[in-house]
Amino acid sequence: MGDTDEQKQRHRRLTAWQRSAKVLARASADHTLAERLTALAADAGTVHDLDEWTDVYGDGVVAEVERRTADLLGMEAAAFFPTGTMAQQIALRCWAGRTGDRTVALHPLSHPEVHERGALTSVSGLRTVHPTSAPRQATADEIRDFPEPFGTLMVELPLRDAGFVLPTWEELEAVVAAARERDAVVHLDGARLWECTSHFGRGLQEIAALADSVYVSFYKSLDGLSGAVLAGPETLVEQARTWRHRYGGQVFQQHPAALSALLGLERELPRLPSYVAQAKVVAGALAEGFADSPVPWFRVHPEPPHTHQFQVWLPYAADVLDEASVRQAEETGVALFRRWFAGPAGPPGLSFTEVTVAAPALGWTAGDVKEAVAQFVARLA
């Protein structure tokens, strides 16, 4: 399939999702440029004084995002970055310089290993090791008994590519303690940290206090346009600002991203616990719906979900499932699933999708979900 065909398919999907009256979540990329800019202009004045001068190289509204995020996480300081990839890579680079050890222990399914084209090694000269290869968070024993030395332990909360999975609070405490026993620093990949509080039964500050530094994203869960923050000790953040400039992240003006970040902190952050609770309802109803269907096998993982996101696995090719998903949206106005992907391992013909439960899903009942499953399965033929 050429680029033109792929663009047509993407336009078809976006159109179907945008026109659907019933969805589980609305992604920011589902909107046109005009819609996003109009909404930002209409709402930004509720979180920041728009009569202030625009930001220049990180002052003004950008500095406000940094201050607010540092307070939320209970950290001394924070720095705004255009991308989480840059923020996290710089954090790990800075820690390597401070510990004198360029080896980072992390999960092989973590974001730097799967989605960043080897940037930690090729750009920052870091070396990565994997205390476990199991599709779950590493255990304290695996950290403690790992045979190679490392200076930094990076923990992704939740571990997205394993199914948005989290350890228990006690397991997380034990993992951090095991790293401390090895004199390693702990960095949290908290791109989706915001929605972890319900699972742990702890607030953001208590979770962040386990680590030496934390990275958080503003577009993955808070519906921001883009942007991320690295939070930690003042000396680390100042060093990170220097490296941000060297990496080309000292952006002249970032007020659209910064304003949308403030809106996310004000509006979406307080709602996340309700999304997590509703995700358990949706996941349970999906399982019941597929169990009652002629589908030969399915998996909802994890069940119940640890956050407001989880995976669904089915024994069909991804393109077949994509077509059924789009047809359901086009023909019924109900968008149950979005994109499907071939499983990274295992037999061919096994695919998964990531389900996100957000504000639009709060009106769904378990019966609505099961009815939508039946409509979806009917289109698999």
Image (spheres, rainbow, N blue to C red):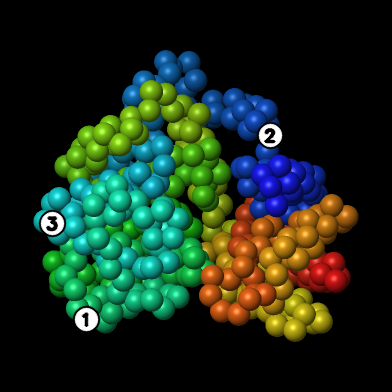
Instruction: Residue at 69% x, 65% y: name it.
Output: 318
Is there a contact, CB below 8 Å, between mark 3 and mark 1?
A: no
- Crowding around mark 2 (Cα neighbors within 10 Å: few <14, some 14 to 19, many 20+) is few
Tell me, for residue 99, which label it has, or none. 3
- In the picture of the structure, the residue carrying the numbered disc 2 is 32
- Crowding around mark 1 (Cα neighbors within 10 Å: few <14, some 14 to 19, many 20+) is few
Q: Earlier in the sequence, mark 2 or mark 1?
A: 2
Spatial CA distance of label 2 from label 3 is: 46 Å
Task: Indicate the amino acid at tag 1.
Answer: Asp
Task: Indicate the amino acid at tag 2.
Answer: Thr
Determine the residue located farthest toward the front in the rendered image.
2
Instruction: Residue at 11% x, 56% y: name it.
Output: 100
Where residue 380 sits in the image (x, y, percent)?
Answer: 81, 69
Tell me, for residue 145, which label it has, or none. 1
Q: Earlier in the sequence, mark 3 or mark 1?
A: 3
- Crowding around mark 3 (Cα neighbors within 10 Å: few <14, some 14 to 19, many 20+) is some
Instruction: Residue at 59% x, 25% y: name it.
Output: 41
Q: Foreground: 367 or 144?
A: 144
Task: Indicate the amino acid at tag 3.
Answer: Thr
The answer to whether one can see residue 14 in this image is no
Vertical arrangement, residue 236 with respect to residue 309, above or below: above
